[in-house]
Image (tube, grey):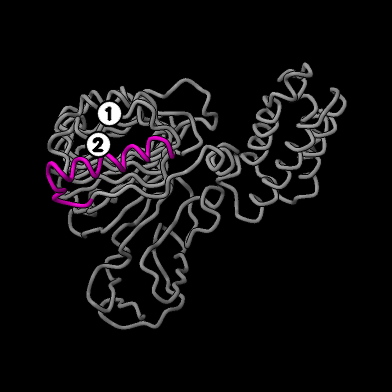
Amino acid sequence: MPILIDGTPHEDGIFPLQLTQGTAHKLKTSPGQGSLSFGPKEQLPKADLWLAADAPVLWPCFDPFATPAGSPWPRNFYYAGNDSGFFAWAQHRPIEGFTWYPQLQQDVHIDASQSKIRELSIHLQQGNLGHIHLKLPEQGLRLHLHGQLSQITVTGGLPDSLSLNPATSKNPADAPLQLPDMGALKKVSTLELGNGAGKQAISLQSLLQFSELESLALWGNHSDLALLSSCAQLKALSLRLMPHLQGLPALQTWPELDFFVAYNVEEATGKRLRQQLKDRAKERPWAEHAAVGQLRKPEWWAKEYGRPFSGWPAARAKMGHAAYDLAEQQLSVAQSLNDVQTALAGFTCRFNTVKGIETTEREDLGQAVNQLAQLQAAQSLGLTDKQAQQWFDENRDY
């Protein structure tokens, strides 16, 4: 697919792009490419273009670019940096999707009320010292907020839909996370609240601040599901990748509910939901979609999400599971603390020959050792968490 530059077709290849002052960047595109990523190399090693986080961006440099159909190109941006000038630029140049990773060290006030951005995603990262004050357009925007949600205050119009993915710890045993006060966003009618299935739970007590909810989608690990009964006006409810549904109110709790999906959820509650779907259909047919599928047993959750390898590349995750299975088997027949030490040291040493273990992967392996140390067989022989972590540190080269 050629790209039009000032109306002239150019086959896919390398183009000069005056993204910043000074020497122009070289933009290399590939067939069918509709998005563009740019930012610091250390944060976006596979980005299309690299530039420093604080480099001022000449956003109008994209004005000459268009698709053969005449739409602005690129359609979607992925930008790590601190130049919020794209909001002003978007008053004149519509943007289909913009994903922003700010690294702010001071507060910033942004008036996006006239910006023509259809879908805006902001990743609020730990370590940012600045606070974002963002004024939204009256309508037409879908907003996604990720990470440290307390770093942003939103005013102006309400987004057509709101998606929240707060930063949660990797330890599901940690006390459930409470969302911060979401200010003006508390009046949204459509909300998606996402989390990892094997991460620290998000307390649904946080939902009590959203008084106008009509559509709710939940992903991952959540607690206090009984409080969903307070969302009495729900018309749509989705539950996905949820290992715990204890306390979920019966579907008859929501008299206006006409859309319901439970997919990849724990088996026991899932079976009850299937019966509730049938019972409700006898009283009043579902006006929209209603289904329950992919019910999962506890063992599936324990292996797929209870272990800290779910975010690993497939090959490494397979290796992690195999090493974990072997250590678990050895611990089940351990007769002494020496046997326990042998099993945990063997698991740890298995990764000494693996090249390029990242910091997060090292932390995951430490968490895996901690989980193995909690097994009844190890605990019955007197193993302590401190001893397990000491053996982990003594035997690893990463």
> As shown in the figure, which amino acid type bears the numbered disc 1?
Pro
**Residue numbers of the magenta segment:** 267-289
Residue 274 inside the magenta-drawn segment: yes
Q: Main secondary structure of the magenta part?
A: helix
Q: Does the magenta stretch include residue 170?
A: no
Residue 272: quadrant of the picture: top left
299 displayed left or right of 167: right
- Secondary structure at numbered mark 1: loop
Name the residue beneath numbered marker 1.
249
Q: Mark 2 points at which residue?
A: 134
Q: Is mark 2 on a helix, strand or loop?
A: strand
Residue drawn at the location 27% of the way across and 79% of the way down: 68
**Vertical position of residue 184 compared to residue 189: above or below:** above
Foreground of the two, 1 or 161: 161
Q: Residue 193 carries which label?
A: none
Q: Position of residue 28 (x, y in %)?
A: 47, 71
CB within 8 Å, label 1 to label 2:
no
